[in-house]
Image: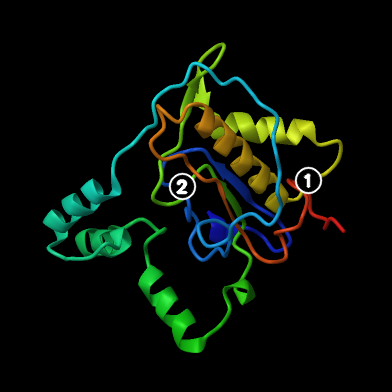
Amino acid sequence: MVNRIPQGAHLTIIADSCNSGGLIEMLKEQVGPGFPPHVCYTPRAYDYNPLYKPRLMPMTAIVRYLESRSGLNSPDIGRHLRHIYGNDVSIKFRGQADHHAQVNASHQPVDQLDDKGILISACQFDESSLDIRGVRRPHGVFTAVLSESVKEEPGPISYKLLVEKCRAKIELFAEKYRAKIERPPHPCLYCSDENVNAPFLQNRLIN
């Protein structure tokens, strides 16, 4: 789907699910494990009570299961899936190893690769997202803080600042319920350098 985006069009994916970091391959990490927020944003307190427990399956359990199926000894989930499913593997993992090898061999910066869209994920690739009980039905904490962050802004907000605000709000939420949350999720942003300061769901840059 990502590869079929016409020239000049922009695709933004918001993924409020477990292990959603890096959902679109070949996108550059702009806010994530290797890039702490560059701004100090203090959100207002918000009551998300009562809390649903995190949806959690330890990555170690997944890796152990895949190792038993593939016979490989590796922490790379994509490698196991390619070995097990061959050409039937999801496009997310197809050719991933060849891509990384090509980038490393040529020392080509990731930001020079083609624009593959914009991904805002509820958590890092090895984390679980959080659910809360809403007025009508359960929903994701990330969905709630993302909506709140957009509504708080009087004007356009860049993708980077939006994700950093969501991170700050979830950190506050996790601190409030630290007895129930073992490991709080960290929203991430993946996109090209051109889009990192673009306004959310718009196509012009914020000066």
> In the displayed structure, would residue 165 be above or below residue 9?
above
Question: The residue under label 2 is which amino acid type?
Answer: Ser
What x and y, as percent, mark residue 40? 70, 48
The local crowd at label 1, few if under 14, some if 14 to 19, many if 20 or more residues have their Cα within 10 Å, is many
The residue beneath circle 1 is: 157
Residue 117: quarter of image: bottom right
Decide if residue 195 is on the left or right side of residue 25. right
> Residue 66, image x and y in percent?
19, 54
Residue ID at (62%, 60%):
191
Along the line of sight, the residue nearer the viewer: 166 or 137 = 166
Q: Residue at horizontal 14%, vertical 55%?
A: 69
Taking depth in this image into account, of 85 and 99 the one nearest to the observer is: 99
Q: Quadrant of residue 114?
A: bottom right
Q: Which residue occupies the foreground of this view, 7 or 205?
A: 205
Q: Which residue is mark 2?
A: 20
Q: Residue furthest top?
A: 136
